[in-house]
Image (spheres, rainbow, N blue to C red):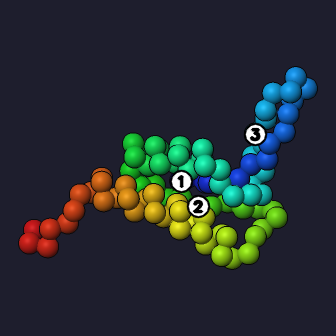
Amino acid sequence: EIHLAGHAEQADDEGDLLLIDSHDGPVADAVWKLFDVVIGRCGPLPTLIEWDSAIPDWPVLKAEAAAAQSILDADSHHVFGKVDAAG
């Protein structure tokens, strides 16, 4: 099962970027790209959008779920091939 979630960015004491798994924003572009790679290698897997605080309006959540579904759907055609009704 894959959980997709947003993150917060902060700097550590040396000024290096930290990515905090905050679950309070949209899924980042880099995460979508990684999700696409993983699904391409493993095939479609149960996936959910995790958004635990600062929850947006329904259309935003629905769009995130639709983005995940489109990656899953695209790969399911690749993995399973086109179904021929003739058998």
Q: Nearer the viewer, mark 3 or mark 1?
A: 3
- State the mark number for residue 19: 3
Mark 1 or mark 2: which comes first in sequence?
Answer: 1
**Few, some or many residues within 10 Å of mark 3 (<14, 14–19, 20+):** few
Q: Residue furthest top?
A: 14
45 and 57: which is toward the camera? 57
Measuring from the top left, give residue 54's x and y in whole percent: 82, 64
Q: Quadrant of the C terminus?
A: bottom left
Q: Spot the residue most to the right.
A: 13
Residue 1's tag is: 1
Q: Type of residue at label 2?
A: Leu
Q: Nearer the viewer, mark 3 or mark 2?
A: 3
> Label 2 belongs to which residue?
48
Q: Residue at x 78, y 51 (%)?
A: 22
- Kind of residue indicated by mark 3: Leu
* Secondary element at tag 2: strand
Q: Residue at x 69, y 76 (%)?
A: 58
Side of 59 where 25 appears, left or right? right
Badge 2 density bin: few <14, some 14–19, many ≥20, Cα 10 Å: some
Residue 16, by quadrant, is top right
Verify CB contact (< 8 Å) between mark 3 and mark 1: no
- Local SS, label 3: strand
